[in-house]
């Protein structure tokens, strides 16, 4: 290596250290502002859009995924806009910053259920990272986000192909944490296709690895996914124990996105055991948590589970169906989803509501929150669906 190259690397190393120290100071000021004020503040002050500042806030955005995904999305969208403008001594730093910004935006979009946008952002991150060979591992992490979104959209073969390719990269780079994520993604596909024992074998392996490394977030996810498999295999006691352990870890670091998912599963298990009143109370709490996180699709589905359980025990659910339309209109639910809720409201008013109709609307809302929207089509009449 020539002396000029050595000096260039030495300067870049000193620059990054200084930049990150300064970025923490300015980043804390930026984080104290509402995300809606970021653009104007960053336009007006160069220190708020410098490289170190953007790197610092991207780390916080990563943490926001678990506690406030809507805020993470709003913040990441601003960073994506300013990352190309950051002054850097070498092009590699700009590639890393831009790729990271798009990757965190993809993650945030995934968490709030904007799947088409999440895939676009993940692919953008991957394309940026691909511009320099040193970011091969980061490029694979962006692809894994795409795989997780594709799983929500039912593209299981593509998910397996991507997850296994990413796992190979992570092994080559000896990135144990990322390898756990890739293996968990593979396990989820096996679970989706009812290969529960195969999924649990992977999850047991990855849980042990995460526990050994002290990665409690990955461990909690492994435990929760194992609980889902155990429940599907009919082992309710094991499922309850695994979910209890997962919830303990999630509560340890305040991962509010995952906590309501566990409570949702637990509520439905209570209903299966005949403890319907307890299940309904838990579902009300869970739906409120999802709504507070801006996860409208999940919140609606929790409410529809309540409607179904109350209807099954002979209650009049008309008022609940009316309230659902009003509440989620105010919350900005997508028009197609609102139309499906309005359909259910009219069925309740007309006395023609059935469990299959409730389930059809629930499935549709869940689908539109996680994949491309399509028009809502009312289900066939009760005779074709087998009645209640």
Image (cartoon, helix red, strand yellow):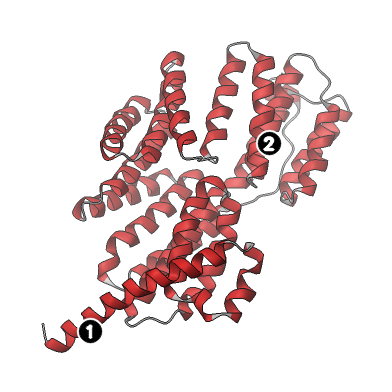
In whole angstroms, how far apart are the C-alphas of marks 1 and 2?
54 Å
Q: Which residue is mark 1?
A: 8
- Where residue 306 sits in the image (x, y, percent)? 71, 26
User: Does 205 appear above or below 275?
Assistant: below
Q: Where, by quadrant of the figure, is residue 45 drawn?
A: bottom right
Along the line of sight, the residue nearer the viewer: 98 or 33: 33
User: Does 30 appear above or below 296?
Assistant: below
Along the line of sight, the residue nearer the viewer: 264 or 380: 264
Residue at 33% x, 48% y is 163
Label 2: few (<14), some or many (≥20) within 10 Å? some
The mark closer to the camera, 1 or 2, is 1
Along the line of sight, the residue nearer the viewer: 129 or 213: 213
Q: For this view, does 379 lie left or right of residue 71? A: right
Residue at 34% x, 80% y is 91
Q: For this view, does 374 lie left or right of residue 173? A: right
The furthest residue to the bottom: 4
Residue at 61% x, 69% y is 38
Q: Is residue 249 visible?
A: yes
- Where residue 84 sits in the image (x, y, percent)? 46, 78
Q: Which residue is mark 2?
A: 288
Number of the label disc, if any, that sits on residue 152: none
Mark 2 element type? helix
Q: Quarter holding the C terminus?
A: top right
* Sequence order check, earlier mark of 1 and 2: 1
Q: For this view, does 65 lie left or right of residue 328? A: left
Numbered marks: total: 2
User: Does 147 appear above or below 51?
Assistant: above
Q: Is residue 384 visible?
A: no
């Amino acid at each position: 290596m020539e002396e000029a190259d050595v000096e260039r690397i030495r300067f870049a190393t000193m620059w990054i250290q200084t930049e990150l120290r300064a970025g923490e100071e300015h980043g804390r000021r930026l984080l104290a502002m509402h995300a809606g004020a970021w653009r104007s503040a960053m336009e007006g002050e160069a220190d708020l859009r410098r490289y170190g500042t953007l790197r610092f806030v991207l780390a916080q955005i990563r943490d926001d995924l678990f506690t406030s995904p809507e805020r993470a999305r709003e913040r990441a969208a601003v960073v994506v806009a300013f990352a190309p403008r950051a002054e850097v001594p070498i092009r590699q730093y700009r590639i890393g910053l831009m790729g990271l910004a798009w990757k965190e935006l993809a993650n945030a979009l995934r968490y709030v259920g904007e799947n088409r946008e999440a895939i676009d952002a993940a692919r953008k991150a991957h394309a940026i990272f691909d511009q320099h060979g040193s970011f091969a591992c980061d490029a694979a992490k962006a692809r894994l986000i795409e795989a997780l979104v594709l799983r929500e959209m039912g593209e299981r073969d593509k998910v397996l192909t991507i997850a296994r390719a990413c796992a190979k990269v992570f092994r080559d780079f000896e990135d144990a944490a990322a390898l756990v994520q890739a293996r968990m993604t593979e396990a989820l596909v096996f679970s989706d296709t009812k290969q529960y024992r195969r999924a649990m074998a992977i999850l047991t392996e990855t849980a042990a690895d995460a526990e050994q490394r002290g990665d409690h977030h990955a461990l909690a996810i492994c435990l929760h996914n194992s609980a889902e498999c155990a429940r599907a295999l009919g082992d309710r006691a094991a499922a309850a124990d695994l979910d209890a352990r997962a919830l303990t870890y999630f509560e340890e670091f305040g991962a509010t996105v995952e906590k309501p998912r566990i409570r949702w599963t637990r509520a439905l298990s209570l209903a299966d055991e005949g403890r319907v009143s307890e299940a309904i109370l838990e579902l009300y709490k869970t739906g409120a948590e999802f709504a507070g996180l801006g996860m409208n699709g999940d919140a609606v589905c929790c409410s529809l589970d309540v409607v179904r359980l109350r209807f099954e025990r002979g209650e009049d659910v008309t008022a609940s169906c009316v309230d659902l339309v009003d509440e989620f209109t105010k919350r900005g639910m997508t028009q197609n989803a609102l139309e499906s809720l309005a359909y259910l409201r009219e069925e309740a008013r007309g006395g023609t509501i059935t469990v299959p109709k409730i389930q059809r609307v629930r499935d549709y809302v869940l689908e539109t929150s996680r994949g491309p929207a399509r028009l809502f089509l009312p289900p066939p009449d009760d005779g074709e669906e087998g009645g209640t």
